[in-house]
Image (spheres, rainbow, N blue to C red):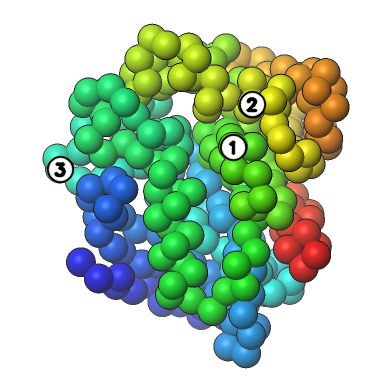
Amino acid sequence: MALERIEHRACFGGWQDVYEHASTALGCTMRFAVYLPPQADKAKLPVLYWLSGLTCNEQNFITKAGAQRYAAEHGVILVAPDTSPRGDDVADADGYDLGKGAGFYVDATQAPWAAHYRMYDYVVNELPALIEATFAVTGARAISGHSMGGHGALVIALRNPGRYRSVSAFSPIVAPSQVPWGEKALGAYLGDDRAAWAQYDATALVETATERLPLLIDQGDADEFLDGQLKPHLLQAACEAAGHPIDLRVQPGYDHSYYFIQSFIGDHIAHHAKALRG
């Protein structure tokens, strides 16, 4: 299947599109969203990749975050992939936190997940190659995400020095090896070897990071998952011990929802736009 545009909607002077394609990395048909701001008609632009959280697909960010307004203001292309492989032959599980909609941005090594669940490879390699071959882009990349997607953004940036100009996250799962969501997913996808888990754990990765890319994180103090699943203080402590720059902004009264993301997405896009122009 060639790249096929399946949605095309005018938005803030640009276009909000959704594409479908056959993914080699995942062995299934995938969808991703692309927002092309009005400047895309005249010049090559940088790209901000957005990774969404549990239960989401490519639609959640583009319909709920209000990000297109700021992308149009700053001249940044937004790319938002799905959160897992999809299809009738793709393995799944009961519950919302494993299987479809819960790829955790890892390359699975365990059956039955290894056949399709290679979201790390997809986001790091296949998707950017497709974007850069299809659209007029500068090659400058940034990455951000929410919850499970915040975990993915931090891990991918930390593991790929020089690939991204900036990284940020909303309410990220910063230490999946130490919380129930992560223990369930990493155990299923990667097996019992916790050394393999550490390769997908931002708190572990900052200890040996070779690039000191600053981490911008917004976290609501009324987040229902704050104490049980997110634990941002663990990443802050690891960054302080390693001398890794982090700006952890605890926002009073905000929860885990897209109302929180709407409130601060403008700050994040401005942060990325500045780095992408550098």
Quarter of the figure with the C terminus: bottom right
Q: Earlier in the sequence, mark 3 or mark 1?
A: 3
Note whether residue 67 is visible: yes
Instruction: Looking at this view, name the residue that lies furthest to the front.
Output: 210
Q: CA distance from mark 2 to mark 3?
A: 35 Å
Give the answer, above or below, for where 107 lies relative to 125: above
Dot 3 falls on a residue whose secondary structure is loop
Question: Where, by quadrant of the figure, is residue 150 drawn?
Answer: top right
Residues at badges 2 and 1 in contact (C-beta under 8 Å)?
A: yes
Mark 2: which amino acid? Leu
- Name the disc covering residue 88, or none: 3
Circle 2 Cα neighbour tier, 10 Å, few/some/many (<14 / 14–19 / ≥20)? many
Quarter location, residue 117:
top left
Q: Residues within 10 Å of mark 3 (few under 14, many from 20)?
A: few
Q: Which mark is residue 243?
A: none
Q: What is the crowding at mark 1: few (fewer than 14 residues within 10 Å), some, or many (at least 20)?
A: some
Q: Secondary structure at mark 2?
A: helix
What is the secondary structure assignment of the residue under circle 1?
A: helix
The reply, left or right, for residue 228 in relation to residue 79 is right
**Residue 270 appears in the rendering:** no
Residue occupying the point 29% across, 46% down? 26
Q: Nearer the viewer, residue 63 or 21?
A: 21
Q: In this rendered view, identify the residue nearer to me: 209 or 173.
A: 209
* Residue 10: percent from left, percent from top: 51, 80
**Mark 2–mark 3 contact, CB under 8 Å?**
no
Number of numbered discs on residues: 3
Which residue is labeled 1 in the image? 159
Front disc: 2 or 3: 2
255 above or below 135? Answer: above
According to the picture, the residue beneath numbered tag 2 turns out to be 205
Q: Residue at x 40, y 48 (%)?
A: 122
Label located before the other in sequence (2 or 3): 3
